[in-house]
Every structure is written in structure tokens, then in C-alpha cells.
Amino acid sequence: MDSTRRGRDVAIWLVLCAGIVTGCGITGDPPERTAEAEQYARGVAAQIVTDLQARRNPDTRTADQIGRALAVRPEANLIAISGVDTAHPAGVTAVIRIEGSGTDGSWLEPEFVVEDFCFELRFAPPLRRPRPRSPARHLPPG
């Protein structure tokens, strides 16, 4: 009877240890790391767009000006740029590459992933929306 209880206690201890080790994040999921890396890269791209659309920049910029502004950014690599200027209806299109990194969230031995993400940024004049028509007035009869 004593050996049965001892065997059960050992089995419970092993199950508890397995649960603790798995809960510490030792087994990592690569899609989670990739998602974290992509989220970081999207944040950097959004910040670049915000910086380039700031009020201190002129309203109309040439593709050369935008290309130079992107080329000096240390967090992004300019791949290609096309277009004439931002006043043209087609605008300026730039393709940049940003390196994103992510971890599996483990505090014991974190595993890192570094991936490159490409983004296409378009700088163009805002689309003009037609003015909304005023609702038809119902005139009282007579």
C-alpha cells in the first residue's frame, strides 16, 4: 500500500513539473515570434509615414526629396521609388525594407527571430470627396 502511494506521488510530481516547464515558455511558437516581428516593423513604417507627412514638410515634394528622406533613415532601407511628385494624381510610391525582430516570450532562454518586411508607401494628394447634397426639403402644400 505504501509503494502505491509513493508511486502516485511521483507521478503527480512529474505531471506538475511538466506543467511548470511548459508554462515557462520553453516550447516556443514561431508564428508568435513572426507576428511580433511584423508588428514591430509595421510600427516603424507607420512612424516613418507620420514623420514624412508632418507639417514641417512642404505640401508638394518630388520623388527625389522623398527618396533622400527615406535613404537617411537608419531603421529602413529604400528599395525603389517611382513617381514624379506628391501633387501628381498618382503621387510617389516608395518601397522600403524594415527589419523586425520578435521573441517567443520565454524569460529563461528566449529564442529570437529576425525577419525582413517590405512595405509600399504611397504619398499622393488626398482624394476629393464630392460635397454631400443637402436633403430634399419637403415644402408644405399650398
Image: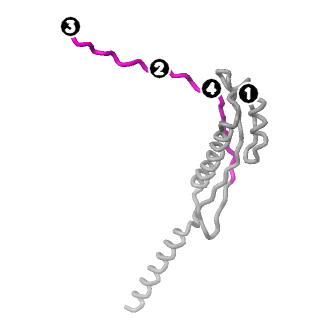
**Can you identify the residue that label 2 sits on?**
131
Q: Taking 86 as reference, is 24 above or below it?
A: below
Q: Taking 77 as reference, is 2 above or below it?
A: below
Q: Given this view, does label 1 or label 2 mark the residue nearer the observer?
A: 2
**Residue 130: horizontal and vertical position, in percent?**
49, 19
The amino acid sitting under disc 2 is Arg
- In this picture the colour scheme is one colour
Q: Given this view, does label 2 or label 3 mark the residue nearer the observer?
A: 3
Q: Residue at (44%, 85%) from the top-left corner?
A: 7
Quadrant of the image containing the N terminus: bottom left
CB contact under 8 Å: marks 1 and 2: no
Question: Which is nearer the eye, 9 or 60?
Answer: 60
Q: Taking 47 as reference, is 27 above or below it?
A: below
Q: Given this view, does label 3 or label 1 mark the residue nearer the observer?
A: 3
Quadrant of the image containing the C terminus: top left
- Residue 142's tag is 3
| Mark 4 → mark 3, Cα distance in angstroms | 49 Å
Magenta segment's dominant SS is loop
- Compare marks 4 and 1 and give the one earlier in the sequence: 1
Q: Given this view, does label 4 or label 3 mark the residue nearer the observer?
A: 3
| Mark 4 → mark 1, Cα distance in angstroms | 15 Å
- Residue 58's tag is none
Q: Given this view, does label 4 or label 1 mark the residue nearer the observer?
A: 4
| Mark 1 → mark 2, Cα distance in angstroms | 32 Å
**Can you identify the residue that label 4 sits on?**
125
* Mark 1, other Cα within 10 Å: few <14 / some 14–19 / many ≥20: some
Q: Residue furthest bottom?
A: 2
| Disc 4, SS | loop
| Mark 3 → mark 1, Cα distance in angstroms | 62 Å
**Can you identify the residue that label 1 sits on?**
82
- Compare marks 4 and 3 and give the one earlier in the sequence: 4
| Disc 2, SS | loop
